[in-house]
Amino acid sequence: MVEPVEGGRRDRVVTRLKHALPLLITVTVIILVWEFFGKITGEPEYVLPPLHKILITAVDRSLDKLLPATSVTVQEIMAGFALGTIVGFLLGVATFHVETLRRAIMPLVIASQAVPVLAIAPILVIWFGFGIEPKIIVAGLIVFFPVTINTMAGLGAVERDVINLMNSLDATPRQVFFKVRFPAALPAIFTGLKNAAVISVIGAIVGEWVGSDAGLGPVMIAANSAFKTDLVFAAILYLAVIGVSLFLAVSLAERKLIAWHFLTRNPRG
């Protein structure tokens, strides 16, 4: 009985390695091309610094410049993500239940996404100054849209027969929402949150580019002006880590809070 179990585990490992092989090959090729780009093309290092130099800069400049700047940017991202999530969820619930509000608000919500955030950021700086507030608002403006749309889609995805069953049991609208619609909408809501987790970084950094003296945005601008491309890429690396970490945190919360969704979708969990 032991051999089949071990053989099954070995087969699963081999299968996972086969699935991961294309990604590993792609990443390896990218790393090698990046590392030896200057030697291959003859371009100066400031065009595309070797990867090892970027990693060294990310470590060497961490304490004096990158980590303090990252602390400011993380505050902006987290506050903007929280603001956009709250506003997006409440707006999605309200517009789903009130048709008049949906007709009045949704065209404006869609129009807000048609205007580039880079065009809105300078106005917010004029209104709120060079502090943290404009960056939070810009991040919130980017975050709220996917949360709103996915909340509305999730609330509307419940089968009509389920609603009819609840109505036949004399359930109140509050009971229908909390016992049926909201739990059913959670997978869609978390999809919006994962999307928002990544793009919230864009909102904060755009706000810093427009007007700020603290954060990773000013670090990138100053380094770019001085042709310190390795420092620019190091700051980008920090931003990538922030975005991926926030995405993974939301994904972990999704796994914990709606584990039933993964069990019903995939018997293996």
Image (cartoon, helix red, strand yellow):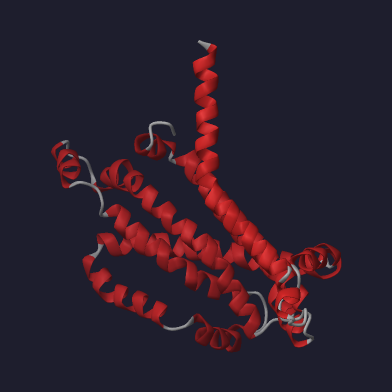
Q: Position of residue 108 (x, y in %)?
A: 34, 78
Q: Quadrant of the C terminus?
A: top left
Name above or below for residue 265 compared with residue 63: above
- Residue at 67% of width from left, 83% of height from top? 130
Q: Position of residue 20 (x, y in %)?
A: 54, 46
- Residue at 13% of width from left, 38% of height from top? 168
- Residue at 36% of width from left, 57% of height from top? 151
Which residue, as the protein is rendered here, is positioned at the far front?
40
20 sits left or right of 262 in the view: right
167 sits left or right of 14 in the view: left
Can you tell which quarter of the image residue 232 is in?
A: bottom right
Can you tell which quarter of the image residue 93 is in?
A: bottom left
Nearest the eye: 20 or 256:
20
Name above or below for residue 149 compared with residue 109: above
Q: Position of residue 67 (x, y in %)?
A: 78, 64
The reply to whether residue 136 is in sight is no
Q: Position of residue 235 (x, y in %)?
A: 72, 70
Can you tell which quarter of the image residue 34 is in?
A: bottom right
- Residue at 67% of width from left, 62% of height from top? 31
